[in-house]
Amino acid sequence: MNRKELLSRVDHTLLSQTATWEEIRALCDDAVAYKAASVCIPPSYVKRAKEYLGGRMAVCTVIGFPNGYNTTAVKVFETEEALREGADEIDMVVNLGDVRMGEFDKVTEEIRVLKKICGEKILKVIIETCLLTEEEKKALCKAVTEAGADYIKTSTGFSTAGATFADIELFAAHVGPEVKIKAAGGISSFEDAEKFVSLGADRLGTSRLVKIVKAEG
């Protein structure tokens, strides 16, 4: 797979707490220039980015980020507001406390509620694999599938580790055929990106691939 094909799968990402509009605008420019799949940005910049991009690039934002322990009502409000302001894709974080307590029906229902709000817009579900057991990951594959989400996603990039090849293999073996996979966190080379895709990832959450190509001129 060539670099152009890999870049077309990238959610070009900037979620730093200190991100400025100038940095977000530059991210948008680079995403357009290198034909990424989307820009993944903080909710506070969605409206401005959508207006700036004018349909040239999909805008993705995050909900319940990065800890996931907001109430469902708060996540609903965040999602509705993001969609009103122009978000094309939503990346939500599950409630990891519910996961650890085995309350997967509750987790599934929260995902289902947000997917209903998203409608035809893409919903990705971040499960933060580095904090979970293998059995919890498998149970979340089932929850994401049953709730009708579009993607399962490995990581926020704000916890103890990011995507691993083993996690993508596990997802591929346990999600339903209609659920796609996003690897995110720590993807730092085109070689790793290609490996993630070969194992089943459809999207890649990273800023480094675009930076590599840009630095090479």
Image (cartoon, rainbow, N blue to C red):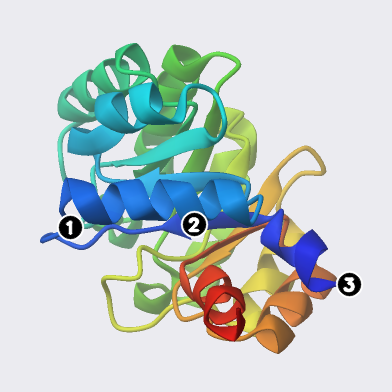
Give the structural element (helix, strand or loop) at label 3. Answer: loop
Residue at image x 67%, y 63%?
171
Q: Distance between the Cα atoms at labels 3 and 2?
A: 19 Å
| Residue identifier under label 2 | 12
Give the structural element (helix, strand or loop) at label 1. Answer: loop
Point out the tag, 3 or 1, that comes first from the N-terminus.
3
| Residue identifier under label 3 | 1
Q: Amino acid at mark 3?
A: Met
Q: Quadrant of residue 182?
A: bottom right
Point out the tag, 3 or 2, that comes first from the N-terminus.
3
Give the structural element (helix, strand or loop) at label 2. Answer: strand
Seen as rendered, the residue at the extreme left is 18
Left or right of residue 69, residue 117 in this image: right
Q: Distance between the Cα atoms at labels 3 and 1?
A: 32 Å
Cβ–Cβ under 8 Å for marks 3 and 1: no
- State the image coordinates of residue 40 (x, y, percent, origin top left): 41, 48
Q: Looking at the image, which is closer to me, 170 or 10?
A: 10
Point out the tag, 2 or 1, that comes first from the N-terminus.
2
Q: Amino acid at mark 2?
A: His
Residue 95 visible? The answer is no
Q: Counting other residues with Cα less than 10 Å from the Cα at mark 3, is it few (<14), some (14-19), or many (20 or more)?
A: few
Left or right of residue 3, residue 139 in this image: left
| Residue identifier under label 1 | 19
Left or right of residue 215, residue 178 in this image: right
